[in-house]
Image (spheres, helix red, strand yellow):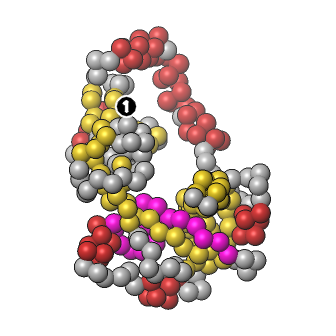
Amino acid sequence: MLVECLRNWLPKFGVPVYFKNALLTTIIILGISLVARGSANIVLNPSYPESQSLRNWRSKNHAYLTKIVEEKKYLQHSTRHSMAPQEKISSVANVLTNETETKFRVKVTSKISDPQQKFWYMACDNCYKSTAAQYLWNITCNVCHAETVAKLRTKFAMTLSDGTTELEAILFGGLAEKYLSLPANDLMEKDEQNEKVDCAAINTQLYGKEFNADIRKKKVQTRYGPENQYTVFGLEEIQ
């Protein structure tokens, strides 16, 4: 109901909106998505100095902004500069050896090679870095310093191969849950009951399926020295 009110009301009146801790729930206004957590605080007509400056700016530029909205130029701009999927397909061998680029798209098959790994971790709900706190504890994050809570988050390593070679990459969050078809809460409950994720069944379902995987390569410091870490930030099955 709130989403519908915002969608219908804000475009008419141009009321400034302040999203606190905005990340997950999507509201579409004038063709542009505003993304926020379901627990985000939405303040209409906030009293912050920045909000008054925004009102003054909008009043001075009302005619120009109206023209932009009518011509939908903001959508044209968005199309030109959006993060479109990479068309260039790299090999896994190139991902491993390339020291100049950090993002790659590869066409691969996938499997879970280590069924003994832990498939979830406790994370800061703001920056997603690991925390030693218990589930839903109020915390001050040691990394981002936000006052937030500890939440469960899915994380696991998978093996990607394309015929040239293979690499181990990490999946996080919603992408990892979609791959496993299991939310983080269920994964924690399995651990508490000494049950294992049925990796054999998952690998059987994945056998023969190909994916376009977007991989981010990053140098990280480990106890063994600097190593490359590979994170999957996009995964789409090729039909």
Question: Does 166 sit above or below residue 133?
Answer: below
Question: Quick check: 234 left or right of 81?
Answer: left
Residue 209 on image: x %, y %: 58, 81
Q: Nearer the viewer, residue 11 or 230?
A: 230
At a point 33% along the width and 68% down the height, the residue shown is 183
Residue 117 on image: x %, y %: 45, 74
**Magenta segment: does it hold 183?**
yes
Image quadrant of residue 13? top left
- Image quarter hosting the N terminus: top left
Question: Does 174 sit above or below residue 199?
Answer: above
Question: Quick check: 139 left or right of 202?
Answer: left
Q: Is residue 187 visible?
A: yes
Residue range (magenta): 166-184
At a point 68% along the width and 59% down the height, the residue shown is 104
Image quadrant of residue 187? bottom left
At a point 59% along the width and 86% down the height, the residue shown is 208
Residue positioned most to the front: 223
- Image quarter hosting the C terminus: bottom right
At label 1, which amino acid type do we have? Pro
Residue 122 on image: x %, y %: 34, 58
Q: Dot 1, crowdedness within 10 Å: few (<14), some or many (≥20)? A: few
Residue 28 on image: x %, y %: 40, 43
The number of numbered badges drawn on the structure is 1
Circle 1 is placed at which residue position? 11
Q: Nearer the viewer, residue 32 or 218?
A: 218
